[in-house]
Amino acid sequence: MKFCSCQRLGMMLALSAVLSAAPTLAQDRDVIPRGSDGWKTAGDGSTVAEVILPAGFLDKDCPAYHKEAVLVGVPVETSPEGAFDGADTIVERLDDAAFDDRGVATTKIAVRALHFRAVDNLGTGCGEWSADVGLDKDQAVTQMTIVREDAKGGYFTAPIAVNALWTFRRTSDGAERQLRTSNVLVSEDRSPWQADSCDKAAASVDSVLVAGGSGAGLKVAASSISRGFNPGYVNCQPVRLCRGKVLDPAIHCYSAASAASVAAAAK
């Protein structure tokens, strides 16, 4: 009888432990932890910006300039090196996103790093100028809405606010001019996200330092791609997403950068 009582007590304790753990496990599945997402921009003509420069801006005798510029992404330097697989844009989700009963979650987001370059130099009445685009000092915070349609994932929507700093350099003498612009890129399309992990590599660092380029010196949360949130993925393959309208005053097309190298870089 004594043995049976102990056995019954052990079973009760085990059952109690399982029941107490169940809500925690469910809660983990219902929350996307804060993190950062890296994106790559191809220079194939899909990302275009309208460049409008008044007369005298580049040089006192330089006429006004108004043309489209095709942009390509330049990888942002990070520490650990390669933490975002050569991403040129890093967007940080600032807080945990908890799904409600309808499968909807929200989180605040901000662009933390961005570096584009004009594929071709700007031919003006005062020489040829290269053009680089980075972030200005302060960036606005917007809201991402994440919808879970089923266990495989769903879609998200988010306006992306960018306060940019354009740097123009004349190729002949290195003369430099800077121009600040502000824009909010939106999309009426639903951008997909995939649940679970595609690379099976858990990030072993909690934060990543943006080491060079725009956003330098900022620490951002590491990607949570290995924790069940893969934005821009379908069947573990990145898809092209686009924001903005042609031209209003820009359209940005991009694909997800893998975060598998975060774990590798930290080892």
Image (spheres, grey):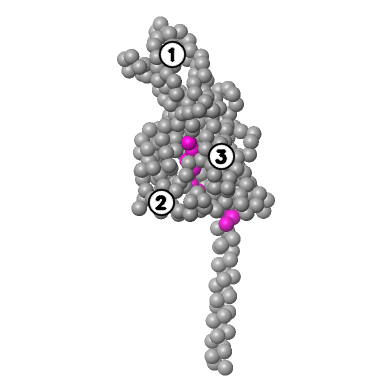
> Outermost residue toward the bottom?
1
Q: Name the amino acid type tagged 2.
A: Ala
- Mark 1 or 3: in front is 3
- Marks 2 and 3: in contact by CB < 8 Å? no
Q: Magenta: predominant secondary structure element? A: strand
Q: Which residue has dot 1 on it? A: 123
Left or right of 258 on screen, residue 1 = right
Q: Which residues are magenta?
A: 29-40
Q: CA distance from mark 3 to mark 2?
A: 23 Å
Q: CA distance from mark 2 to mark 1?
A: 44 Å
* Residue 117, visible in the rendered structure: yes
Vertical placement of residue 209 versus 31, above or below: above
Vertical placement of residue 40 versus 171, above or below: below
Q: Which residue has dot 2 on it? A: 263
Q: Secondary structure at mark 2?
A: helix
- Mark 3 or 2: in front is 3
**Viewer-closest of 175 and 172:** 172
Q: Secondary structure at mark 3?
A: loop
**Viewer-closest of 264 and 80:** 264
Q: CA distance from mark 1 to mark 3?
A: 34 Å
**Viewer-closest of 240 and 23:** 240
Q: Name the amino acid type tagged 1.
A: Gly
Give me the residue at 54% from left, 44% from top.
237
| Image location of residue 14, percent across then percent down | 55, 76
Q: Give the quadrant of residue 13.
A: bottom right
Mark 1 surroundings within 10 Å by alpha-carbon count, few (fewer than 14), some (14 through 19), many (20 or more): few
Residue 239 is tagged as 3
Q: Give the quadrant of residue 76.
A: top left
